[in-house]
Image (cartoon, helix red, strand yellow):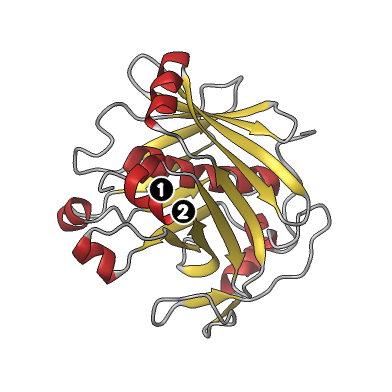
Amino acid sequence: MDQLFYNGPPDYVEIEDRAITTEPGASIQAAPGAIWMEALPAIEGIPAGLEYLAYLDTVMVHQVKEVLEILTGWESKNKYAIRNKNGQQCYYAFEESNAWERQCCGSQRGFTMHIVDNFNKNVLIVKRELRCCADSFCGCLLGLQNICTIESLSTGLLGTVLQGYGCTNSFYNILDKDGNLIFLVDGQGCCTSCCCEDKDFTIKTPDSSVPIGSITKKWGGLLREAFTDADTFAVTFPIDLDVKLKAILLGATFLIDFVEFENNN
């Protein structure tokens, strides 16, 4: 990728006021009273459907849990509402996976995460292959375990996320479509699920120790943390970061959720 940053979206300061309050996508589910972002015009150089990201420096990813899953523990397909920091929804994500893998393989299962806009148009696909127990063990020995790819429906592959292991914690390498290392995401140690606090995964460029953003798992409270694996993440990055890189970091959030926090499977 030629550069990490661009000149910024036109009139981005006005985006927070542009919203609709009814659900336009026929098959997208929204919480009562949800505020939906309206469609945005195309922006040159930005993959179709990712225009929202050009105006954002923070994305909130809220996992949606069904009552039946909470009561029975039967693992259903993961679903997420993706909003800006003001609570306006711009995307919805839903998992496509094998039912047998969900129940038997839990957090190691393969999946395809479809990210659609509020008009039910596919804009991103996050893919991860099934990791069996043997693969996981060998991956730990080799220092590399989980891999996911992020694709745009309009332009193809955007990048890849690789999980590796250090002495005490995991980490994530973020690669662009050509395989170049663009970000390092510092993982947590062995106690990602303990302590009543947020969990930060800092985002750095390979040549700097200064964070440019983070993927933060927000503490949900004792009851929520104890009885469900419904997580909320805040993804922060510079507003002028290349939109394709913002999309890759958004995709990395789903891999981090599965690897680090799917504890009830």
Viewer-proximal residue among 36 and 69: 69
Q: Residue furthest right?
A: 44
**What residue is shown with label 1?**
101
Residue 192: percent from the left, percent from the top? 28, 35
In this rendering, position of residue 48 left or right of residue 76: right
Identity of the residue drawn at 75% across and 61% down? 48
Q: Position of residue 261 (x, y in %)?
A: 33, 43
Task: Return the residue at label 2.
Answer: 98
Q: What is the secondary structure assignment of the residue under circle 1?
A: helix
Residue flagged by tag 1: what amino acid is it? Glu
Q: Amino acid at mark 2?
A: Asn
Q: Are marks 2 and 1 in contact (CB under 8 Å)?
A: yes
* Residue for point 45% across, 42% down: 215
| Residue 254 marker | none
Q: Identify the residue at the far front of this view.
A: 100
Q: From the viewer's perspective, is residue 48 above or below residue 216?
A: below
